[in-house]
Image (cartoon, coloured by chain):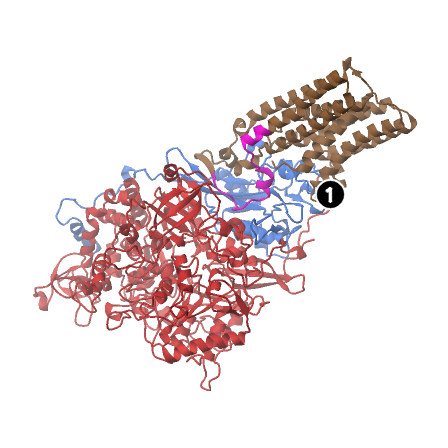
Chain colours: A brown, B blue, C red
C-alpha cells in the first residue's frame, strides 16, 4: 500500500495524544497550577488534533469531512471520527474544569479514558477490518496501535507529570516496560505478517482470476502500459533489503534509544529532558514503523498485477 | 446509507465470457468515452500528452499467460470492472454514505457530492474496481451505465451498458441474476460461470465464464478420424487411379 | 433500506443530435453515430461515438480505436494551417502561410513538372481510402508514378487472390461465419476487417464450431482459438501444402468442383524443348483444351457437353497425331504435392509444427468439408446454363492477411491457401469463403497497368492493374523500369499495388531516374511506414554536390504533426475524419458484405475550427489550378468546387460514379444512373451508407452464377458477364519462367533469371524467405516481427490521450527459452541485432510464442518531439520501432548486386522475414536506442490535465 505521509503522521501523532489523554483521564498526577495543567491538556489534545487535521490532507475533499460522522453504524472510519470528536469535546470540558476550576472530574476522566482507547481502537480497525490486506486483517493490529498509543502516553506522562512512581515503579521503568510490551506486540505482528502473505492464504494470481485450474498463471500485460491509481495506491512495491533496513531504524529509534534514555533518566535523575528526548526518538521510530505498516502491506489487487 | 440492503429486487450485473474476449479494449475505451461526459464527474487524465499519462478508467483489461503442465502456454484476456457485490465491502466502509447499493437493482453507486475522497472503499475492494479521479478527487466506479439502462432518451435496444453494446466479440452480457430464467443466469449455469475471489466473501454479482479447453498440438487424430489413403501407395498411378474411379461416380 | 439522498437520474439528456458517418480510426470502416452536444462555448461538441446498429460492417459494435475518436478529433497534434519549411529538412521549422500561397507554390512545382517531364512527380498515398480518386487525379496529371501503400501492406494477398480466383481475403471476401464448420485464420493484422472478424469468431464460438489460429504469437484472435498452430514465420505455405498432401493422399478433394470451376482439367503442354513448354494447349481461338473423357480427345474446355478429365495424356496436333504431348494441369499438381517433400514428417521441423497436429488438422478439415457438407436449398443456374436445384457447401473457411503477405514468399503462400480452399470446393460455396461485391472479378475483369510520360497529357489508363503476360510489363526497350518504384519491371513484375516503400530509396539513388517533386499523403515514410527508417531520414535530407536536396521538393499532406511533417517543404494540412467528405467507393474498396453491395461516405459531422482542408478537396483545387482534364470545364473554369462536388457529379463511365446508391436525377436508381444532386444527402439520411442486397439466387457460386453475373451488370459492377475459371495453374508465371529460360521475350537481366526460375512456379510453391538465406542463420538464429495492437492503429493512435495510456510503450516479447540462454529477465534491456543494425529495447518474457520468434507491438515508438507529445514521452524513451533494423535491401551477395527485400513476384515488402540475434544490454540508462534529435513541433503542446465532458456533468 502507498505510505501516505498524512496518514502516517495522523495515526502516530493522534495515537500518542490519545494515549496521553487516556492516562490523564485515569488521573495521572500532573504538576499543579493552571499553566502546567493547561499545558498538559493542550499537549494531549494538541497531538490528537494535529493528527486529525493531518488526516484530512489525505482527503480529496476535506471540505466535506463533516459528512464522515454520519455512517458510524457500519464504517470504522466514521466511528473513529465520531469517537475522536466526542472524546476531544469531553476532554475539553475536563481540561477547562481542571485548569480553571481546579476540578478534576474523576468519572468524566474515566469516560474519556475509555473513549480515547476506543478511538485508537477504531483507528486501528479501519485497517484491521480489511480482508483485502491480510497483513492488517487481524486483532493484533488494534493491539499494536493501542500498545504504541499507551507507551507513547506513558513516556510523555512520565516526562511532564509530577509522579516519580506509578504502580510502585519509577516512571522511567514504567515507560521502559510499556515500550517493551508495545514492541513485543509489534514483533508478534511482524512475525504474523511475515507468514500471512497471500501465499499463506492460498490466494495467488491463479485463484484470483479463477484461471489457475488450467495452469500456472502470470500477468502478461498490464491493462495500461503506464501506472494507474490502483498500481500507485495498492501495488506499492518495496524491496526486502530496504524493508529490513527500515525495521532496524524503527527498532533502534523506537525501542533501543528510548530504553537507554529511560535508564539514563533513572540513573541521572534528569528525567524531564531525557524522557522528552526518548519520546522524540520513539516518535521517529514509530514513523518508520508506520511507513512500513503501509509499504509492506500487500493488497489483493496486487494479485491481478 | 452505507448499510447494505438485505436483499435487492433485481441483481443486475454482467457475464464476462473469457472464452471469446480477444482483449481489444473496446469495452475499456467505450466505457471511458460514455462515462466521462455522463454520470458524475468526468474521468480525468493527467499528463495526457506528457511523460506519464494516466487517468481514471472504470474498466480495464488484464492479460494473463497460463502455462499448463503438458501443453503450450496460452493467453487469456481478462476484463475487470465493478462486480456489484451483494456483500460489497466498499459500501460498508464508506464513512459518508456516498457509496451505496441500490435496493431496487443492486447497483453499487457513489453519490459523488458526498464523497470525501478518502479512498477507503478502494482499499476495501479486492478487485481494484474503484479508482479515484486524479483531478476531481472523488471515487469513480462502474455504474453499470445506470444513466443508460433506464434512459428513455435511448432506444430500448440501447438501454444496456456501453461496454456490452460496443463489445465486438459479444464477450459481455448484461442482465438480472435474480431471475433464474434470464439469459445471464442460464449462461452462467451452463458454462460454469464463477465468482472472482470467493474467499473474500463479497458475493460478486458479475460472473466470469471460463475459457473452453484448448486442443493440444501433440494429440494425434483418433483412429477412426485419421485420413485413410484413397489408393494403394505403391500402385504406379496412385491418386490417378483413384481419380478414374471417382470420376466414374460423378458420371 | 439503503436509500441515497439523491436518486440517480433515470433519463439524463444524452445528446442534442446524432450524425452518422464512417469511422476512420483504422481501415475497417465501421458505421458510427456521432453524438453532438452543446459545449462550453455553445458550439456542438462530440459527446459520444458509438457503433451504428444498422451498419453492414459493424452492426452496432465499435472497437477501442473507434471509441477513442473523440481524442483523435480534438488532438493537440492537429495541424492548423498550411506550412512552408524555413529550417533544414528534418528539423521541423516552419512558417504558417495562407492557402492561396500554398496552392500557388504547389501549383508552380507541379505545373513545371507536368509541362516538362511528368514522371518527375512521384505521387504516393499512404492510408488512403480514396484511391479511385487519387489514382484518377494522377492519371490526369500524366505521371506514371502513382500508387498507394498496398505494396508495403498486403499486395501479396490481393494479387495472390485475384490471380488465382478473382477475389481476395478481407476486402473482396469474407468467411461464411454463419455456416462454416471449421475456420482457420493465418497471421492477421488487427485493423483489417477488425470488427467483423471479432463478431464472426464470436458467432463461430456460439455455434460451437472449431477455430484454429496459425500464428507464431498466441495473442488476440489466436488466444481464443480452440487450437493454436505455433508456426515458424514464413513457413505457412509449407504447412498448407502439407495439408494439401494429406488431403490428396486421402482423396479428400472435390473433383466435381475442380472440373466445373477451375483450370485443373486444362491441358499443359509437355514439350521440354519447345517455346511453349508448360503453357496451356489452346485451340485456334485461344481456348484452353481439355481431355474429353467420352472421346479421349482434346477439345476446348468450354465446348458444350464436354466431360473433362483430370488425368491422362493427349497428343496434340491435328487429329491428335502430333508429336507434342499435353497433360491436365491437375495431374502435374497431384504429382507435385503428393511428393514426399510435402509429407508432414518432412515439413514438421521447418514449420515447427508437430506431425500429429498437421495430420489431425488435415483430417478435421476433410471431415468438416465432406462429412458436414452444408446444403442451401436454393435453385440456381450456372453460366453454362446448367440448372442446379441446390447449393452444396464445403464448410471450411480460411482467412489470412499480413502474416502471410509480408514475406518474400507471400504471393506463393497466399496462392497455396487458395489452392487448399479450391481443392476443398469451398470458394463461394456455403460455409466457405464468400465474395463481396463487386467481386468476384478475375483478371479478365481487371485493368492492366498503364505507363507513359508525355508532357501535358494524361495517362492512357489507370496506373495499377494486373498484367496478363510479361509483355505487358512497364519497362523500356533496354529493360529498365518506367516507374520510379520499379513496379511492373523485373524487380517486381506483378506488383499490382506499386511499391511505395521503394520510392524514396530509388529517388535518392536516382535509379532509374531522379525526380523533382515527391508528393505524399498520409504516409509516415520517415518513421514507421518505411523499412530502414534511419536510412530514409538521411535520404530525405541528403544534398547533392550543388548543395541542393537530392529529392528537390517534397509536398506532404497530413492531419497531424507526424514524423514525416518535419521532412516536407510544403505542408497541406488535412482535416480529421469527422470534418471531411469521403467516398468509400464501389470503384475502389467498398464496404460490401457477402450478401449486399454496400458503399459509404464520410461527411463533415463537425466543422473544422482550423484553417485546414480535406486532402481530396485540395487535390481538386490543384487539379483545376493545373487545368487537368476531367477537372476543368471547356471554358477553363473548375469543374468541381470540392471533393463532395466530385463525389456527386463525377462519372467514370456514363452512369457510373463514385457512389452507387441513390443515382439518377431523383435518386431512384442503384449502381447505374445519372448523377443525383441530392445523393450525399440521401446517404446522410440513411446513416452514411447504402446497402443493396444480392438476389438469393446469386448468393453463392458467384464466380459461375448467371444470376450474379446479370445482377452485377445491372448494378454497374461490370459491363458484361465475366468468366471466372480458377487458376490453380497460373500461366503468366510460367511465361516469366520461359522468358528466364530465353524462350520468350522480353528477356530478363542475367542476374534475375535464376530467381525467376525458382520462384515463379505456376503451381503454388514454397521457398525459404530470402533474408534467411542471405544471412548466416547461426549468427541471426531468431525471427522478429511486429503485431498491430487491437487498440492502436499505426502511429495515428499515439497522440490519442486515451489509447496512449493503453499502449504508451512496447517491450520486446522474447520466448522464455531465448531469455534463459541470454540471461534475460522481465524488465531487463537487450540489444536486438539484425544484419542491418541494432536497437536497444526493454524485454518481457513470454511462453505463448513460437520458440524461435520474438515480437513487439507495431508503431508505438515515436520520434522525440513528434505528434505533439512531450520529449520525455514513453513512446520516445521506451517505445521503439523494429523498422530501424529492417533494410529495404537484402545483404550484399558476392555478385555486387543488392536485391530488394521483397517478394520477387509482387514486390511486397518482406518485413516479416527479419532475422535477429539478442544480447543482454549493459545496465545503464533505461532508454531505447537509437534516439534522434528532438523534432520541432509546428503546433502547440498541451500540458494541462484533461477532464473531457466536464461541462455536461454536475
Left or right: residue B244 versus residue A299 is left
Left or right: residue C696 versus residue C795 is left
Residue C883 location (% of width, % of height): 40, 54
Q: Nearer the viewer, residue C796 or C422?
A: C796
Residue A216 location (% of width, % of height): 44, 34
| Residue B156 higher or lower than C573, as above or below | above
| Residue C281 higher or lower than B233, as above or below | below
Q: Nearer the viewer, residue C652 or C350?
A: C350
Residue A102 location (% of width, % of height): 91, 25
Q: Is residue C915 magenta?
A: no
Which image quarter: residue C488? Answer: bottom left
Count numbered badges in the picture. 1
Q: Residue furthest right?
A: A101
Left or right: residue A77 versus residue C629 is right
Q: Is residue A242 magenta?
A: yes
Left or right: residue A158 versus residue C453 is right
Q: Residue furthest bottom?
A: C635
| Residue C739 higher or lower than A216, as above or below | below
- Asked whether residue C675 is in view, the answer is no
Which residue range is magenta in the image?
A219-245
Sort mark 1 into few (<14), some (14-19) or many (20+) by Cα contacts within 10 Å: some
- Asked whether residue C364 is in view, the answer is yes
Residue C601 location (% of width, % of height): 49, 67
Look at mark 1 in the image and give the residue it sits on: A62
Disc 1 secondary structure class: helix
Q: Nearer the viewer, residue C797 or C91?
A: C91
Task: Name the chain letter of the residue that bears numbered label 1.
Answer: A
Amino acid at each position: 500500500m502507498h505510505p501516505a505521509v498524512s496518514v502516517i503522521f495522523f495515526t502516530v501523532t493522534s495515537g500518542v495524544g490519545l494515549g496521553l489523554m487516556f492516562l490523564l483521564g485515569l488521573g495521572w498526577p500532573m504538576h499543579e497550577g493552571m499553566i502546567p495543567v493547561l499545558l498538559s491538556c493542550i499537549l494531549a489534545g494538541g497531538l490528537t488534533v494535529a493528527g486529525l487535521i493531518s488526516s484530512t490532507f489525505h482527503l480529496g475533499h476535506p471540505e466535506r469531512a463533516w459528512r464522515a460522522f454520519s455512517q458510524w453504524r457500519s464504517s470504522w472510519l466514521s466511528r473513529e471520527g465520531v469517537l475522536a470528536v466526542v472524546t476531544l469535546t469531553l476532554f475539553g470540558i475536563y481540561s477547562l474544569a481542571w485548569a480553571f476550576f481546579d476540578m478534576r472530574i474523576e468519572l468524566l476522566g474515566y469516560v474519556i479514558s475509555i473513549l480515547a482507547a476506543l478511538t485508537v481502537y477504531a483507528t486501528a480497525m479501519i485497517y484491521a477490518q480489511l480482508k483485502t490486506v491480510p497483513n492488517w486483517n487481524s486483532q493484533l493490529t488494534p493491539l499494536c496501535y493501542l500498545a504504541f498509543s499507551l507507551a507513547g502516553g506513558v513516556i510523555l506522562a512520565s516526562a511532564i507529570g509530577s509522579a516519580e512512581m506509578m504502580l510502585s515503579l519509577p516512571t522511567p521503568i514504567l515507560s521502559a516496560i510499556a515500550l517493551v510490551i508495545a514492541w513485543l506486540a509489534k514483533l508478534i505482528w511482524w512475525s504474523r505478517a511475515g507468514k500471512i502473505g497471500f501465499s499463506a492464504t492460498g490466494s495467488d494470481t491463479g485463484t484470483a482470476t479463477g484461471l489457475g485450474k488450467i495452469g500456472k498463471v502470470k500477468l502478461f500485460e498490464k491493462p495500461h502500459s503506464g501506472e494507474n491509481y490502483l498500481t500507485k495506491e495498492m501495488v506499492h512495491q518495496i524491496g526486502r533489503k530496504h524493508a529490513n533496513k527500515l525495521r532496524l531504524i524503527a527498532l533502534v529509534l523506537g525501542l533501543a534509544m528510548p530504553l537507554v534514555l529511560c535508564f539514563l533518566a533513572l540513573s541521572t535523575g534528569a528525567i524531564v529532558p531525557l524522557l522528552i528526548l526518548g519520546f522524540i526518538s520513539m516518535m521517529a521510530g514509530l514513523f518508520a514503523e508506520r511507513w512500513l505498516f503501509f509499504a509492506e502491506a500487500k493488497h489483493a489487487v496486487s494479485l491481478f498485477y | 446509507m452505507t448499510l447494505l440492503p438485505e436483499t435487492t429486487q433485481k441483481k443486475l450485473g454482467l457475464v464476462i465470457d473469457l472464452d471469446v474476449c480477444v482483449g481489444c479494449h473496446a469495452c475499456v475505451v467505450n466505457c471511458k468515452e460514455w462515462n466521462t461526459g455522463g454520470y458524475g464527474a468526468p474521468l480525468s487524465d493527467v499528463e495526457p500528452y506528457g511523460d506519464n499519462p494516466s487517468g481514471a478508467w472504470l474498466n480495464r483489461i488484464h492479460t494473463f499467460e497460463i502455462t499448463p503442465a503438458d501443453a503450450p502456454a496460452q493467453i487469456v484476456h481478462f476484463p475487470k470492472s465493478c462486480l456489484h457485490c451483494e456483500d460489497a465491502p466498499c459500501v460498508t466502509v464508506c464513512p459518508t454514505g456516498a457509496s451505496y447499493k441500490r435496493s431496487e437493482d443492486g447497483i453499487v453507486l457513489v453519490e459523488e457530492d458526498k464523497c470525501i475522497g478518502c479512498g477507503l472503499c478502494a482499499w476495501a475492494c479486492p478487485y481494484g474496481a474503484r479508482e479515484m479521479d486524479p483531478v476531481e478527487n472523488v471515487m469513480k466506479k462502474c455504474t453499470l451505465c445506470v444513466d443508460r439502462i433506464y434512459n428513455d432518451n435511448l432506444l430500448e435496444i440501447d438501454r444496456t451498458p456501453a461496454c456490452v453494446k460496443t463489445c465486438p466479440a459479444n464477450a459481455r452480457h448484461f442482465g438480472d441474476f435474480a431471475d433464474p430464467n434470464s439469459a445471464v443466469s442460464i449462461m452462467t449455469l451452463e458454462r460454469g460461470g464463477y465468482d472472482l475471489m470467493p474467499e473474500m466473501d463479497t458475493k460478486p454479482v458479475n460472473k466470469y465464464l471460463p475459457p473452453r479447453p484448448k486442443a493440444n498440438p501433440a494429440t494425434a487424430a483418433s483412429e477412426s478420424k485419421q485420413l485413410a489413403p484413397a489408393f494403394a501407395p505403391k500402385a504406379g498411378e496412385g491418386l490417378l487411379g483413384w481419380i478414374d474411379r471417382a470420376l466414374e461416380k460423378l458420371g | 433500506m439503503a436509500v441515497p439522498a439523491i436518486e440517480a437520474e433515470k433519463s439524463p439528456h444524452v445528446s442534442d443530435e446524432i450524425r452518422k458517418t464512417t469511422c476512420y480510426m483504422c481501415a475497417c470502416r465501421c458505421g458510427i453515430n456521432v453524438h453532438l452536444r452543446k459545449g462550453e462555448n455553445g458550439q456542438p461538441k462530440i459527446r459520444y461515438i458509438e457503433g451504428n446498429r444498422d451498419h453492414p460492417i459493424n452492426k452496432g459494435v465499435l472497437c477501442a480505436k473507434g471509441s477513442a475518436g473523440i481524442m483523435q478529433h480534438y488532438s493537440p497534434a492537429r495541424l492548423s494551417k498550411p506550412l512552408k519549411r524555413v529550417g533544414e529538412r528534418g528539423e521541423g521549422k516552419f512558417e504558417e502561410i495562407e492557402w492561396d500561397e500554398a496552392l500557388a507554390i504547389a501549383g508552380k512545382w507541379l505545373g513545371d513538372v507536368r509541362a516538362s517531364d511528368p514522371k518527375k512527380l512521384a505521387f504516393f498515398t499512404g492510408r488512403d481510402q480514396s484511391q479511385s480518386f487519387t489514382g484518377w487525379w494522377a492519371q490526369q496529371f500524366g505521371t506514371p508514378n502513382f500508387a498507394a501503400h498496398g505494396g508495403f501492406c498486403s499486395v501479396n494477398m490481393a494479387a495472390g487472390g485475384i490471380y488465382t480466383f478473382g477475389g481476395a481475403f478481407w476486402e473482396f471476401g469474407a468467411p461464411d461465419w454463419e455456416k462454416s464448420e471449421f475456420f482457420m485464420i493465418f497471421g492477421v493484422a488487427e485493423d483489417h476487417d477488425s470488427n467483423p472478424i471479432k463478431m464472426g469468431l464470436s458467432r463461430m464460438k456460439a455455434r460451437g464450431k472449431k477455430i484454429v489460429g496459425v500464428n507464431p504469437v498466441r495473442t488476440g484472435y489466436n488466444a481464443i482459438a480452440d487450437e493454436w498452430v505455433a508456426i515458424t514465420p514464413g513457413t505457412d505455405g509449407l504447412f498448407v501444402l502439407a495439408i494439401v498432401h494429406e488431403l490428396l493422399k486421402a482423396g479428400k478433394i472435390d473433383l466435381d468442383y475442380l472440373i466445373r470451376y477451375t483450370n485443373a482439367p486444362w491441358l499443359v503442354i509437355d514439350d521440354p524443348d519447345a517455346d511453349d513448354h508448360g503453357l496451356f494447349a489452346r485451340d485456334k481461338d485461344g481456348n484452353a483444351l481439355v481431355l474429353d473423357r467420352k472421346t479421349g480427345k482434346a477439345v476446348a474446355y468450354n465446348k458444350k457437353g464436354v466431360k473433362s478429365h483430370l488425368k491422362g495424356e493427349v497428343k496434340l496436333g491435328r487429329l491428335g497425331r502430333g508429336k507434342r504431348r499435353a497433360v491436365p494441369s491437375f495431374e502435374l499438381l497431384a504429382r507435385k504435392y503428393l511428393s514426399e517433400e510435402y509429407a508432414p514428417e518432412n515439413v514438421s521441423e521447418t514449420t515447427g509444427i508437430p506431425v500429429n497436429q498437421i495430420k489431425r488438422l488435415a483430417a478435421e478439415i476433410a471431415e468438416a468439408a465432406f462429412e458436414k457438407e452444408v446444403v442451401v436449398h436454393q435453385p440456381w443456374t450456372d453460366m453454362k446454363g446448367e440448372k442446379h436445384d441446390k447449393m452444396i457447401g464445403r464448410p471450411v473457411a480460411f482467412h489470412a492477411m499480413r502474416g502471410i503477405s509480408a514475406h518474400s514468399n507471400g504471393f506463393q503462400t497466399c496462392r497455396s491457401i487458395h489452392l487448399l480452399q479450391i481443392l476443398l470446393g469451398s470458394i463461394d460455396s456455403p460455409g466457405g469463403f464468400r465474395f463481396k461485391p463487386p467481386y468476384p472479378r478475375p483478371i479478365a475483369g481487371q485493368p492492366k497497368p498503364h505507363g507513359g510520360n508525355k508532357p501535358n497529357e494524361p495517362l492512357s489508363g489507370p496506373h495499377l492493374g494486373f498484367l496478363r503476360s510479361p509483355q505487358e510489363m512497364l519497362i523500356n526497350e533496354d529493360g529498365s523500369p518506367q516507374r520510379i518504384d520499379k513496379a511492373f519491371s523485373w524487380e517486381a513484375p506483378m506488383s499490382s499495388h506499386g511499391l511505395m516503400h521503394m520510392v524514396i530509396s530509388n529517388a535518392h539513388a536516382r535509379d532509374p531516374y531522379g525526380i523533382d517533386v515527391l508528393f505524399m499523403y498520409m504516409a509516415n515514410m520517415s518513421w514507421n511506414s518505411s523499412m530502414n527508417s534511419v536510412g530514409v531520414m538521411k535520404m530525405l535530407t541528403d544534398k547533392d554536390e550543388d548543395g541542393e536536396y537530392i529529392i528537390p521538393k517534397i509536398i506532404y499532406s497530413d492531419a497531424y504533426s507526424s514524423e514525416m511533417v518535419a521532412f516536407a517543404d510544403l505542408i497541406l494540412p488535412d482535416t480529421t475524419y469527422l470534418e471531411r467528405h469521403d467516398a468509400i467507393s464501389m470503384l475502389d474498396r467498398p464496404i460490401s458484405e457477402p450478401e449486399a453491395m454496400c458503399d459509404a461516405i464520410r461527411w463533415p459531422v463537425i466543422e473544422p475550427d482550423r484553417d485546414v482542408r480535406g486532402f481530396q478537396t485540395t487535390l481538386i483545387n490543384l487539379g483545376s489550378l493545373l487545368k487537368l482534364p476531367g477537372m476543368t470545364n471547356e471554358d477553363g473554369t473548375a469543374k468541381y468546387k470540392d471533393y463532395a462536388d466530385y463525389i456527386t457529379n463525377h462519372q467514370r463511365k456514363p452512369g457510373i460514379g463514385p457512389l452507387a446508391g441513390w443515382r439518377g436525377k431523383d435518386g431512384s436508381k442503384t449502381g447505374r444512373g445519372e448523377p443525383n444532386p441530392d445523393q450525399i444527402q440521401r446517404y446522410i439520411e440513411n446513416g452514411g451508407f447504402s446497402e443493396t442486397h444480392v438476389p438469393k439466387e446469386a448468393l453463392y457460386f458467384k464466380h459461375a452464377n448467371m444470376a450474379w453475373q446479370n445482377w452485377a451488370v445491372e448494378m454497374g459492377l461490370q459491363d458484361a458477364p465475366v468468366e471466372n475459371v480458377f487458376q490453380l495453374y497460373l500461366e503468366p508465371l510460367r511465361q516469366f519462367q520461359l522468358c528466364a529460360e530465353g524462350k520468350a521475350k522480353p528477356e530478363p537481366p542475367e542476374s534475375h533469371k535464376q530467381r525467376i526460375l525458382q520462384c515463379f512456379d505456376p503451381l503454388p510453391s514454397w521457398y525459404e524467405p530470402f533474408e534467411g538465406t542471405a544471412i548466416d542463420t547461426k549468427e541471426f538464429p531468431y525471427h522478429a516481427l511486429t503485431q498491430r495492437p487491437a487498440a492502436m492503429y499505426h502511429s495515428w493512435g499515439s497522440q490519442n490521450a486515451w489509447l496512449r495510456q493503453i499502449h504508451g510503450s512496447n517491450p520486446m516479447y522474447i520466448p522464455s527459452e531465448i531469455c534463459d540462454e541470454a540471461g534475460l529477465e522481465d524488465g531487463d534491456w537487450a540489444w536486438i541485432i539484425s544484419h542491418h543494425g541494432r536497437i536497444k529495447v526493454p524485454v518481457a518474457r513470454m511462453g505463448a510464442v513460437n520458440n524461435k520468434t520474438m515480437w513487439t507491438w507495431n508503431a508505438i515508438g515515436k520520434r522525440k518531439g513528434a505528434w505533439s507529445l512531450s520529449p520525455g514521452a514513453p513512446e520516445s524513451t521506451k517505445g521503439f520501432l523494429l523498422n530501424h533494423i529492417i533494410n529495404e535491401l537484402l545483404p550484399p551477395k558476392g555478385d555486387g548486386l543488392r536485391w530488394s527485400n521483397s517478394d520477387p513476384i509482387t514486390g511486397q515488402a518482406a518485413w516479416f522475414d527479419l532475422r535477429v540475434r539478442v544480447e543482454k544490454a549493459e545496465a545503464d540508462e533505461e532508454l531505447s536506442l537509437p534516439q534522434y534529435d528532438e523534432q520541432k513541433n509546428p503546433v502547440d503542446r498541451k500540458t494541462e490535465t484533461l477532464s473531457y465532458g466536464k461541462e455536461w456533468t454536475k
